[in-house]
Amino acid sequence: MKALLINLFLAMVLASLLGRITLGSLLVCYIAGYALLWWLRPLLGPTAYFQKVLQTISFLLFFIKDLLHSNFRVAVDVLSIHRQSRAGVVAVPLSIKTDFEILVLVSLITLTPGTLGVDVSGDRKVLYVHAMFVTTADEVRANIKNGLERRVRELFR
């Protein structure tokens, strides 16, 4: 957490020195600050910050790829004459525990076209997902558990 705050501070200072605080300049300055902190990491002491930043980037790339794939699949189905969709509600057992992790997972599932987080059981052990393409419930469960849920769990642990 300390390294993140230092990196954000460095990004703001560098962007201020450039004279323009825009999203692009903040991103470039954040990357420059990250490189500087990585170079000075022996002075920071043990930190998982550098690994978490790489995990976050990997997670975002995975989600963007999944989002594009889902958009394409839904668009093809909506525009085709013969519908391939078979909707259904699937119960997905959760291995994540905290409310925040569940919130992130449900939000990401809902943002993905063709799926919608419907409900979470009272004991927070089962998530009910409405999916547009259900060939088998086990396939939908496996896709969620081995995809988004696994990556959300890794990101927040």
Image (cartoon, rainbow, N blue to C red):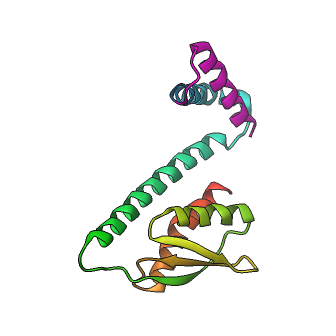
The answer to which quarter of the image holds residue 16 is top right
Say which residue appears at 25% left-offset and 73% top-offset: 80
Q: Is residue 47 left or right of residue 150?
A: right
Q: Quadrant of the N terminus?
A: top right
Question: Residue 4: where, in percent of width, then height?
Answer: 69, 36
Residue 4 magenta: yes
Which of 28/16 is in front? 16
Does the magenta portion include 119? no
Q: Give the left or right position of residue 83, taking residue 63 as reference.
A: left
Image side of residue 60 versus residue 153, left or right = left
Residue 23 vertical position relative to residue 56 in the rendered view, above or below? above
Q: In x, y percent, where is residue 81?
A: 23, 77
Residue range highlighted in magenta: 1-23
Q: Quadrant of the C terminus?
A: bottom right
Q: List x then y, in percent, for residue 152.
A: 60, 60
| Magenta portion: prevailing SS class | helix
